[in-house]
Image (cartoon, grey):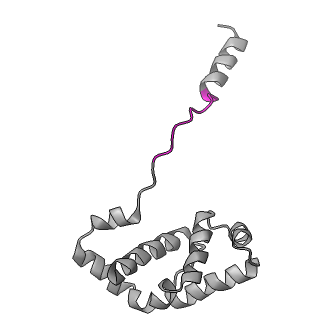
Amino acid sequence: MDTYEAHKSHYQHYHKKPVMKTPPEPISLQSVLDGVSEEERQRLYDEYGVEGMAEIFSNEELMNTVDCFLQNGMNVCLAAKKLYMHRNTLTYRLNKIRRVCGLDLRVFDMAVTFRILRVLYENKTR
């Protein structure tokens, strides 16, 4: 094999076009939490003070803002555009959530924690 063929073979091996697969269905947080014991769910509920977050979780406008923000990859500009609001308004709302809950939704781990706590809250209030 000459040098050209070796380089061509190497290039083709490492630069294969990805095979498009159908993405799997997203896992619902509810189904994950269904596998968690009632005691553990209660511990999380109490430890994070979910009762004190009721003002946030019960505010439909705020929850619509959070949903849009998360659905748009936690991108403030894109979410604000879709919500037809100024980005500073969206930032103000995210800061309000941070003040009340102590969770900054612009940080991925905190956004996931917020979503889990929201499901716990919704399960309690059903």
Q: Nearest the camera: 12 or 117?
A: 117
**Residue 112 at x, y percent in the picture:** 48, 69
The magenta region covers: 14-24
Report the quarter where the N terminus lies: top right
Task: Say left or right for 30 vs 69.
Answer: left
Q: Is residue 12 above or below residue 117?
A: above
**Residue 69 at x, y percent in the picture:** 62, 70
Q: Nearest the camera: 109 or 66?
A: 66
Which image quadrant is residue 26 in? bottom left
Task: Say left or right for 93 vs 121.
Answer: right
Which image quadrant is residue 108 in? bottom right
**View extreme (right): residue:** 86
**Residue 49 at x, y percent in the picture:** 39, 88
Q: Is residue 116 above or below residue 48?
A: above
Give the residue at x 32% y 67%. 33
Q: Is residue 124 visible?
A: yes
Which image quadrant is residue 11 in? top right
Tell me if residue 20 is in the magenta stretch. yes
Give the residue at x 49% y 91%. 55
Q: Main secondary structure of the magenta part?
A: loop
Report the quarter where the C terminus lies: bottom left
Task: Say left or right for 98 vs 120.
Answer: right
Q: Is residue 49 visible?
A: no
Give the residue at x 52% y 37%. 21
**Residue 8 at x, y percent in the picture:** 69, 18
